[in-house]
Amino acid sequence: QVRLVESGGGLVQAGGSLRLSCVASGVNFRISTMGWYRQTPGKQRELVADITAGGITNYADSVKGRFTISRNYAYTTVFLQMNSLKPEDTAVYYCHTHYYGRDNWGQGTQVTVSS
């Protein structure tokens, strides 16, 4: 069974930084694309960034140059380093992987950026 467990969210002032972590189990981490999505009330969940098994990254335009996604194969963990945070980055952030035809999500972690 796939399990994704996020951590690292919290409250930060605008301009600050946070680092999110997602530990994956039940997946072949070496072949899985991992991603971070975010959602605010009343809006659709949107892709923030993802990283392929080979390390190719993709970012939403709104976070390019501020966020960095990375992965550690030994610890089956994917990270999202968020710098220069803005109030509009406030959301619940979810870890995601598409594995054997199914979307798998973590429980989410709240990020709140105060102005």
Image (spheres, helix red, strand yellow):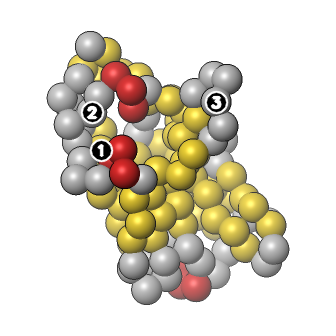
As drawn, the label of residue 107 is none
Disc 2 target residue: 85
Q: Secondary structure at mark 2?
A: loop
Q: Amino acid under label 3?
A: Lys
Q: Which residue is mark 3?
A: 43
10 Å neighbourhood of mark 1: few (<14), some, or many (≥20)?
many
On screen, residue 38 versus residue 20, left or right, reads: right
Q: Nearer the viewer, mark 1 or mark 3?
A: 3
Given the image, on which type of amino acid does mark 2 rest?
A: Leu
Residue 82 badge: 1
Instruction: Classify mark 1: helix, strand or loop.
Output: strand
Q: CA distance from mark 2 to mark 3?
A: 20 Å
Q: If the image is split into quadrants, where does the C terminus sit?
A: top left
Horizontal arrangement in the rendering, residue 106 relative to residue 59 (left or right): right
Residue 56: x, y in percent? 39, 78
Determine the CA span between mark 1 and mark 3.
21 Å
Mark 1 → mark 2, Cα distance in angstroms:
7 Å
Q: Quadrant of residue 114?
A: top left
Q: The residue under label 1 is which amino acid type?
A: Met
Quarter occupied by the N terminus? bottom right
Image location (x, y in percent) of residue 31: 58, 85
Residue contact at pointers 1 and 2, CB within 8 angstroms: yes
**Label 3 Cα crowd, 10 Å radius (few <14 / some 14-19 / many 20+):** few
